[in-house]
């Protein structure tokens, strides 16, 4: 259900046993919908289906651990509206920052604040529960993602020009972004 003020309900999962089969299915369905709508969420060549996505969800869920890997979800009306994965490397040299992966919202729910709510929630979890000082992510250039993240306080920290090849003559930049302080 949305909160009383209409914002998405946020949850986090820190262990594989906490993720129900129904949620695994909803994660897969969301990832398929996002990818097949052209979203930049880990599968660059649509169309995709359960055969590709379900094993990826299973790998992600099996790797959940409180100190290093968390799944954050946003729901509207009791249905999954979006999700992301945050990871940290426990090595002392880089243990102060985390990396976001697979940030996505269902295409039909875009523009309703789900993405912004997820990004605010991960910032809070990273700072208050994981003790992180910075977050990093890589975004596909040319998809409007840099502008979305910039509105939320993220800054470009690097760019790998033309590194992502989607087809002949369709090379895109990979944009590296960071958020600090949290």
Image: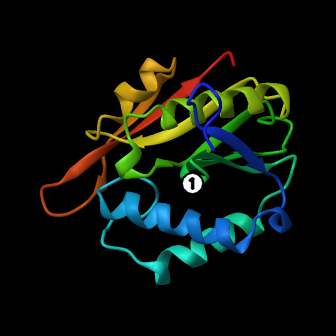
129 to the left or right of 110: right
In this view of the protein, which residue sits in the foreground, 103 or 166?
103
Q: Is residue 13 above or below residue 173?
A: below
In this view of the protein, which residue sits in the foreground, 69 or 94?
69
Residue at image location 61% in from the left, 52% down from the top: 78
In this view of the protein, which residue sits in the foreground, 92 or 152?
152
| Residue 121 visible to an observer of this rendering | yes
- Residue 133 lies, in percent from the top left, at 75, 23
Q: Is residue 148 above or below residue 9?
A: above
Give the image's coloring scheme: rainbow
State the residue lying farthest toward the bottom.
51
99 to the left or right of 169: right
SS class, disc 1: strand
Q: Which residue is mark 1?
A: 80
Residue at image location 70% in from the left, 37% down from the top: 98
Badge 1 density bin: few <14, some 14–19, many ≥20, Cα 10 Å? many
26 to the left or right of 133: left
């Amino acid at each position: 259900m949305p909160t009383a003020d209409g914002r998405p309900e946020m949850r986090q999962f820190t262990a594989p046993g906490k993720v129900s089969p129904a949620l695994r299915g909803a994660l897969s369905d969301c990832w398929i919908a996002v990818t097949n709508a052209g979203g930049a969420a880990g599968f660059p060549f649509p169309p995709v289906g359960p055969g590709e996505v379900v094993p990826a969800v299973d790998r992600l869920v099996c790797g959940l651990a409180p100190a290093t890997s968390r799944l954050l979800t946003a729901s509207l009306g009791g249905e999954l509206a979006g999700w992301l994965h945050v990871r940290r490397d426990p090595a002392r040299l880089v243990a102060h920052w985390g990396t976001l992966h697979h940030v996505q919202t269902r295409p039909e729910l875009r523009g309703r604040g789900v993405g912004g709510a997820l990004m605010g929630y991960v910032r809070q979890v990273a700072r208050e529960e994981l003790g992180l000082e910075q977050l990093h992510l890589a975004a596909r250039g040319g998809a409007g993602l840099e502008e979305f993240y910039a509105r939320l306080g993220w800054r470009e920290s690097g760019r790998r020009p033309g590194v992502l090849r989607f087809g002949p003559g369709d090379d895109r930049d990979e944009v590296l972004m960071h958020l600090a302080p949290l």
